[in-house]
Image (spheres, rainbow, N blue to C red):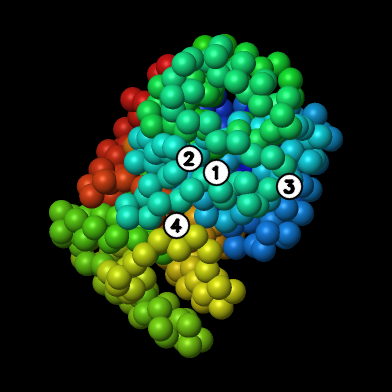
């Protein structure tokens, strides 16, 4: 199976759903890397980071079309279109691109991820105080006819839903945006897709992917390979995401583990003084390591500022954000060069991508899911090969999420993992 996602964390949190059920999975960090196709051929699941989140609608369409066409031409099989669970980026144009490249006239879209508080009811996704009309997003942004399908129709069961879709197809509908309030609703969507034998695209978040992976696992069972034992080193937490959830998680972890939050001055970075910021942070990190700390936490200094959800930023804001995450990535590389790093915890897709880029990481071999939507894997890189990495979307997890992640990583430092037996 091939997963096409618009950012790194999305590609990762979707692929790990399959890893949990015994499938080998790898994240293709750069969609245009120079690795030959046979490098990836031994994996059941290949998750591609298209890195289209900051692109314009047309640019995103063109890139996803090229990727999909290449996948189709190589005969790599089934494609799952991953979209952001709060519809950031260009979910509409990217789905158009996949359908065009596949010459496909049916798509089932289910963005819900109930385990992480993403529920679509009556076509509306509620995230905190923000409400997003999912049906309108796809209807306004796609060149195809779009129909919302609500809970009362879905809960009539897979057979009834299949008949409803067939009826609407005869009216020219090609894209169906489906409600889901529970995992049970997503299971009905998955079961319905199995009853539809024509060419189709399944499109959603990690929630729908989980249902698909559970189904595929019945066909193929594999035992999990234990994590490779690794020399003890530090756990480096790099926080580039600025959300209320992340702020709370970082604050609690700092208090529990009694380590300071080393703050990167974002105003200086934007002014072009990133080298000064890096030197200041490195000095503090070295002081902590000299004290015997095996946990280091670095975060943007604006982490605790007021935050509100924004679906798309201006070009200037994207440029500033990129400058900040590139600085965090450079800082991470220096730390990896200077000391043994056992694991990296990265929050935010852009932060994770830039860290992978600067460490020449062309793949992440997925190992497990620590908690819903938060995977752990081994970096495939000549610089930091086998270093563990946890990628976390900023809004994912409860208040103690970071504490649990750190505990997980420290508990597998010197012993074999007990996880992964299917």
Q: Quadrant of residue 45?
A: top right
Between disc 3 and disc 4, the foreground one is 3
Mark 1 or mark 4, which has the lower sequence index? 1
Circle 1 residue: 135
* Residue at the (40%, 52%) spot, across then down: 131
Asked if labels 4 and 1 touch by Cβ distance under 8 angstroms, the answer is: no
Q: Are marks 2 and 1 in contact (CB under 8 Å)?
A: yes
Q: Quick one: label 4, few (<14), some, or many (20+) residues within 10 Å?
A: many
Image coordinates of residue 283 in percent, x first then y, are: 33, 77
Q: Which residue is mark 3?
A: 143
**Is residue 22 depicted above or below 51 in this figure?**
above
Disc 2 secondary structure class: loop
Q: Earlier in the sequence, mark 3 or mark 1?
A: 1
Residue drawn 56% across the image and 12% down it: 159
Residue drawn at point x = 44 percent, y = 31 percent: 180
- Using a 10 Å C-alpha cutoff, classify the residue at mark 3 as few (fewer than 14 neighbours), some (14 to 19) or many (20 or more): few
Give the residue number, with chain letter if any, for mark 2.
Answer: 123
Camera-side residue: 398 or 297?
398
């Amino acid at each position: 199976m091939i997963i096409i996602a618009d950012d790194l964390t999305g590609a990762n949190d979707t692929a790990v759903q399959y890893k949990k059920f015994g499938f080998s999975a790898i994240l293709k960090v750069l969609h245009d890397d120079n690795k030959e196709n046979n490098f990836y051929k031994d994996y059941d699941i290949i998750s591609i980071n298209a890195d289209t989140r900051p692109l314009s609608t047309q640019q995103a369409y063109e890139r996803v079309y090229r990727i999909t066409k290449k996948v189709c031409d190589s005969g790599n099989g089934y494609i799952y279109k991953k979209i952001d669970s709060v519809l950031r980026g260009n979910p509409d144009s990217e789905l158009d691109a996949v359908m065009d490249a596949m010459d496909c006239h049916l798509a089932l879209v289910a963005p819900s991820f109930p385990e992480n508080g993403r529920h679509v009811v009556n076509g509306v996704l509620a995230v905190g105080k923000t409400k997003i009309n999912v049906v309108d997003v796809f209807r306004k942004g796609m060149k195809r006819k779009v129909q919302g399908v609500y809970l009362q129709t879905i809960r009539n069961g897979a057979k009834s839903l299949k008949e409803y879709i067939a009826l609407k197809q005869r009216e020219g509908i090609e894209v169906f945006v489906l409600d889901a309030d529970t995992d049970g609703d997503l299971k009905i969507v998955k079961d319905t897709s199995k009853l539809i034998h024509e060419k189709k695209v399944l499109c959603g978040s990690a929630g729908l992917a989980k249902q698909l992976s559970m189904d595929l696992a019945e066909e193929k069972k594999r035992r999990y390979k234990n994590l490779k034992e690794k020399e003890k080193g530090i756990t480096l937490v790099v926080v580039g995401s600025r959300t209320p959830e992340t702020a709370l998680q970082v604050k609690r972890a700092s208090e529990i583990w009694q380590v300071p939050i080393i703050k990167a001055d974002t105003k200086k970075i934007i002014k072009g003084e990133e080298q000064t910021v890096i030197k200041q942070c490195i000095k503090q990190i070295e002081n902590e390591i000299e004290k015997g700390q095996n946990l280091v936490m670095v975060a943007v200094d604006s982490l605790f500022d007021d935050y509100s959800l924004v679906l798309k930023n201006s070009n200037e804001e994207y440029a500033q954000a990129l400058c900040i995450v590139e600085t965090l990535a450079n800082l991470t590389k220096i730390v990896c060069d200077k000391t043994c790093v056992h694991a990296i915890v990265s929050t935010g897709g852009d932060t994770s991508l830039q860290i992978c880029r600067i460490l020449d990481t062309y793949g992440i071999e997925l190992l497990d899911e620590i908690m819903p939507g938060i995977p752990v894997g081994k970096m495939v890189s000549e610089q930091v090969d086998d270093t563990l990495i946890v990628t976390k979307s900023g809004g994912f997890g409860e208040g103690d999420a970071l504490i649990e992640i750190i505990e997980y990583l420290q508990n597998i430092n010197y012993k074999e993992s007990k996880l992964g037996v299917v």
